[in-house]
Image (spheres, rainbow, N blue to C red):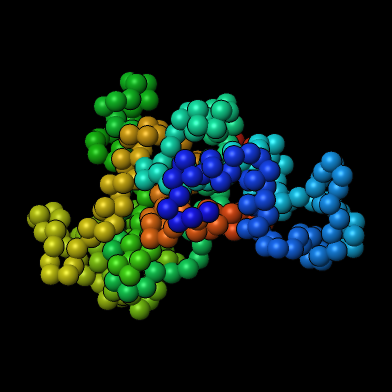
Amino acid sequence: MSDNFSLIKFFKEYPDEESAVRYFERMRWGDEVVCPFCGKTHISEMKNHTPMKYRCRDCRKFFSVRTGTVLTESKLPLQKWLLAIYILTNTTKGVSSIQLAKYLDTTQKTAWFLGHRIRETWSQGSHKLYGVVEVDETYIGGKETNKHNSKKRKAGRGAVGKTPVVGAVSRDGGVKAFVVQETNARTLETVIADNVDPTATLYTDQHGGYQKMGRMYDHHIVNHSVREFVKGAVYTNGIESFWAILKRGYYGIYHSWSVKHLQRYVNEFAIRANMKNVSQTQKIMITFARGLNTRLSYKELINAKKND
């Protein structure tokens, strides 16, 4: 797979299921198949690939390239998995499950589940951001004026009825963003401490929840309430640009996100931002590598609690 990888080149290189299977096998094992159960390489290929393509001669278990990955128990052809990963990593503002279903020739339900299984591999991890880090919060959800009268909170304007998301952008590279219950000082301090290195320089706006961050970081503020947006090198334009792309995706592509699945959608935009300088080949490889030892069943997905 070349770095300049257009959709036409995709279908030339992966015209059928067999070619997609070979590609996933090369990504996972290279030149020699390895048993995912015992790690041995004494492997037999089964006739007609039944019940699975391979069997380990040491532990005697059957397996395929799907075993032990996010692809486990999926009946969808691997060519469609590969195309879905290509599409989701290659679109700036995402793609709806309805549109993805049209691309893949599947039902909307299948495309929706597939999209979330891919997003499940994109969790943001425990690494921390360094250098100059901009932090800000935003709110995701429909406008109260657009809601049916029975669903309106009738408690004010602005962020009423929306879900808060806290994000951080390192000017050295790297984005992290998390759905939170509220944006009080305790919550903001916890999110920042968990995701920003203590040696970092912190830039925020004048939000009250950030007022005590000077105890933990070299903290600088721009006061948006008096239309102060840049103060020398102090500004939050980086994180605000991330919010702008996230909201364009929300309003223009997806239109609505369930609160219980919101973190996965936020992860989707964060990882695309973090992979913007890598090739399309690397984006697919990163996604597949993150899918090892990752599993999301349909039952788990639909029964997920809020913010899972």
Residue at the front extreme, as displayed: 12
Left or right placement of residue 277 versus residue 300 in this view:
left
Q: Is residue 274 visible?
A: no
In the depicted structure, whether residue 239 falls above or below residue 81 = below
Residue at the bottom extreme, as displayed: 199
Left or right placement of residue 6 versus residue 60 in this view:
left
Give the total of numbered labels.
Answer: 0
Q: Position of residue 299 (x, y in %)?
A: 66, 37
Residue at (36, 38) in percent of width and height: 250
Q: Is residue 198 visible?
A: yes
Q: Quadrant of residue 296?
A: top right
Please state which of residues 195 and 225 is positioned toward the viewer in this rendering.
Answer: 195
Q: Position of residue 154 (x, y in %)?
A: 29, 29
Please state which of residues 23 and 202 is positioned toward the viewer in this rendering.
Answer: 23
Left or right placement of residue 63 versus residue 229 in this view:
right
Q: Quadrant of residue 207?
A: bottom left
Left or right placement of residue 294 versus residue 147 in this view:
right
Q: Position of residue 99 (x, y in %)?
A: 46, 30
In the depicted structure, whether residue 111 falls above or below residue 61 = above
Residue at the top extreme, as displayed: 149
Residue at (17, 70) in percent of width and height: 233
Q: Position of residue 278 (x, y in %)?
A: 42, 60
Residue at (33, 20) in percent of width and height: 149
Residue at (90, 63) in percent of width and height: 58
